[in-house]
Amino acid sequence: MLTPAEGFGGAGPLAQYGIAAPTGWGIAAPARVQQESEAASSAERLDGGLFASIFQNAIQNVRDTDAENVQAQYLLSTGQLDNPAAATIAATKYGISVDLLVQLRNKALDAYSELTRMSI
């Protein structure tokens, strides 16, 4: 079975986003990406507080699920995906993670608007 990296001459479809192409279809992100996100999230907890950490984790979740969705769509379109339901699951996960991020943004904007309306 060809991997996306082999199909695109070794660069992989996600190379433009700084994500190395996995060697096979899987749910987990590459270890390098997980280590970088863990280091970044621990540094952000010190700098930006809990809200910043939650928001950054939601953004990273959208990035990760988008990468999984792109990978699943690629494998489905090239006929390498044995279970077509996996592509639907990846697309649904991506949609839910985007919805969560939008809801977090809306709640933050509502809280900010409420604070600006308060009289001191």
Image: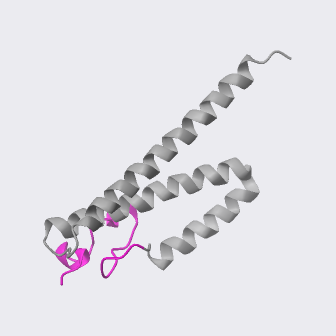
Q: Position of residue 101 (x, y in %)?
A: 51, 45
Report the front residue among 4 and 114: 114
- Magenta residues? 1-27
Total labels drawn: 0
* Residue 83 inside the magenta-drawn segment: no
Residue 16 against residue 97 in the figure, above or below: below
Residue in the image at 26% along x and 65% along y: 85
Q: Residue 112, percent across and down? A: 67, 28
Colour scheme of the picture:
one colour
Residue 26 on the magenta span: yes
Residue 52, relative to residue 74: is it above or below?
Answer: above
Q: Position of residue 119 (x, y in %)?
A: 82, 15
Residue found at x 39% / y 72%: 27
Return the x and y of residue 5 as percentages of the image width and height. 25, 76
Q: Nearer the viewer, residue 18 or 41?
A: 41
- As drawn, 11 above or below 95: below
Going 29% across and 67% down the picture, which residue do you hit?
A: 86
Quadrant assignment, res 12: bottom left
Please state if 64 lies on the left or on the right of 87 as rendered. right
In the picture, the quarter occupied by the N terminus is bottom left
Image-based side of 48 in relation to 65, left or right: right
The structure residue drawn at horizontal position 56% and vertical position 66%, both measured from the top left corner, is: 37
Q: In the rendered image, which quarter is residue 116 located in?
A: top right
Nearer the observer, 35 or 51: 51
Q: Quadrant of residue 20?
A: bottom left
